[in-house]
């Protein structure tokens, strides 16, 4: 069986260095809010190209803290609207609703699978305060048009960069440094993955950075001074040390993903299968390799019979989830493109360790479907 992604192999790729980093922290006797967080935050901020990086417990919290900080700073208030792609992973929407904000779901383009800028303006109202773009599948979702819409309507631009560490937009800036703030996830399967949960916020805004740092530490702005009612949402020292090791190898790992993607683009020629529009390599770090197929379930079963594991991202879009069935913003929403993607998407194996001969085999099997 060719696994979708072997985390054991991914960790093994830089195993000795990771073991050494973990050992260093274990033996240091210092496990939270120490030198490892400080080093990783500095290294990740300069990698992304942002002034500030604040480590936190996971990617969902990173996004929650961005919206919550804007509420604490008086930039947003409950009931305000946030424009967001309808086909994102559930957590993006949850970060908005957790803060009492209203998600306004905008359809993606079926060619790019990213939020369709042509549909954004029609969704803007007097309550819109932000656009949250998601660099889904590792693809850059930022377009100059989106930046223009934000300036024109005085909206915050928030990036969900959970799937796109190392990706760049058209002008060469890294995703996660383009908007007013970005949330990053270091869930193990992400391009930059920890050995457990982890996340971070990046921003150039010192006030936002200070609020996020306080919120993720009970709301504490100084020792035993509580400015906000926050939570305990910190990145631990072991994860920070592991992430700092893996950050050094991220570009090489992403380059392997890009090489695999090139093989898929050059090799897949089955007319039943549609590949998303190909972006220049700088703009896609291929967290996932999604394809569309009207016979998706048959294709998945056929690949499994032939020893290839695949996954679906995502089978049920957020607006179809039970928890949002009665949400006021979800009353009779018609999102045919998002539903089409949910019905047709299949993610092929890709990652920093998959062998090129396995990719060649997968292509051959797909072309015989
Ligand atoms: C993984 C992910 C998140 C959530 O990150 P966690 O660290 O798992 O909480 C948010 N948004 C997107 C697009 C993701 O892929």
Image (spheres, rainbow, N blue to C red):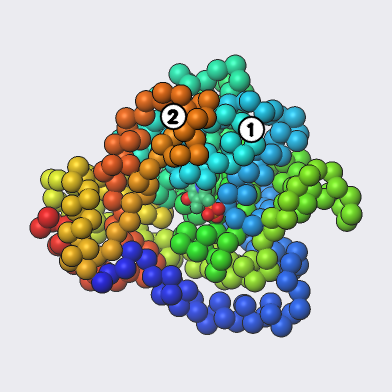
Above or below residue 115? Residue 11 is below
In the image, taking residue 28 as reference, residue 81 lies left or right, namely: left
| Residue 343, percent from left and from top | 28, 42
Q: Total number of numbered labels? A: 2
Q: Report the side of 107 relative to 67 (left or right).
A: left
CA distance separating discs 1 and 2? 19 Å
Q: Is residue 124 visible?
A: yes
Task: Report the front residue among 229 and 326.
Answer: 326
Report the residue at 52% width, 20% height from top. Answer: 124
Task: Using the image, tell me which numbered label, if any, was put on residue 106.
Answer: 2
Contact check, label 1 and label 2, Cβ < 8 Å: no
Mark 1 burial class by Cα count in 10 Å: few <14, some 14-19, many 20+: some
Which residue is at a point 52% across and 30% down the rendered structure image?
Answer: 327
State which tag comes first along the sequence, 1 or 2: 1
Quick one: 92 or 146, which is closer to the camera? 92
Pointer 1: what residue? 100
Which element type, helix, strand or loop, lies under badge 2? strand
Comparing marks 1 and 2, which lies closer to the viewer? 1
Quadrant where the C terminus lies? bottom left
Q: Is residue 315 above or below residue 77?
A: below
Residue 180, given in percent of the width and then of the height, sits at 62, 38
**From the viewer's perspective, is residue 206 above or below residue 364?**
above
Question: Relative to residue 24, is residue 165 depicted above or below?
Answer: above
Query: Relative to 112, is 65 on the left or the right?
Result: right
In front here: 208 or 169?
208
Give residue 160's position: percent from left, percent from top.
53, 44
- Quadrant the N terminus occupies: bottom left
- Residue at 38%, 43% (x, y): give it: 316
Query: Neighbour class for label 2 at 10 Å: few (<14), some, many (≥20)?
Result: many
Quadrant of residue 57 in the image? Answer: bottom right
x 62%, y 78%: residue: 22
């Amino acid at each position: 069986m060719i696994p979708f992604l072997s985390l054991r192999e991914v960790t093994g790729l830089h195993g000795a260095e990771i073991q050494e980093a973990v050992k260093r922290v274990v033996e240091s006797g210092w496990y939270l809010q120490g030198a490892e967080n400080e080093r990783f935050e500095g290294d990740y901020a300069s990698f992304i190209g942002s002034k500030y990086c604040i480590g936190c417990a996971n990617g969902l919290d990173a996004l929650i803290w961005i919206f919550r900080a804007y509420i604490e700073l008086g930039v947003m208030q409950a009931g305000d609207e946030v424009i967001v792609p309808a086909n994102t992973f559930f957590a993006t929407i949850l970060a908005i609703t957790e803060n009492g904000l209203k998600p306004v779901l905008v359809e993606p383009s079926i060619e790019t699978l990213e939020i369709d800028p042509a549909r954004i303006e029609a969704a803007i109202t007097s309550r819109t305060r932000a656009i949250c773009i998601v660099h889904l599948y590792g693809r850059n979702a930022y377009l100059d048009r989106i930046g223009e819409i934000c300036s024109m309507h005085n909206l915050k631009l928030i990036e969900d960069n959970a799937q796109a560490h190392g990706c760049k937009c058209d002008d060469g800036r890294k995703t996660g440094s383009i908007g007013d703030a970005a949330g990053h996830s270091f869930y193990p399967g992400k391009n930059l993955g920890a050995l457990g949960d982890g996340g971070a916020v990046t921003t150039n805004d010192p006030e936002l950075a200070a609020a996020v740092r306080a919120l993720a530490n009970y709301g504490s702005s100084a020792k035993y001074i509580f400015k906000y009612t926050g939570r305990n949402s910190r990145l631990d020292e072991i994860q920070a040390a592991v992430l700092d090791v893996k950050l050094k190898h991220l570009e090489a790992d992403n380059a392997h993903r890009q090489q695999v993607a090139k093989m898929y683009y050059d090799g897949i020629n089955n007319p039943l299968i549609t590949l998303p529009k190909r972006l220049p390599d700088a703009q896609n770090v291929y967290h996932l390799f999604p394809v569309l197929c009207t016979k998706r379930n048959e294709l998945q079963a056929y690949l499994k019979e032939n020893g290839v594991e695949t996954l679906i991202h995502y089978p049920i879009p957020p607006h179809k989830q039970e928890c949002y069935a009665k949400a006021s913003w979800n009353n009779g929403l018609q999102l045919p493109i998002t539903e089409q993607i949910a019905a047709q998407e299949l993610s092929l194996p890709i990652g920093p360790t998959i062998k090129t001969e396995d990719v060649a085999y997968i292509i051959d099997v797909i072309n015989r479907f």
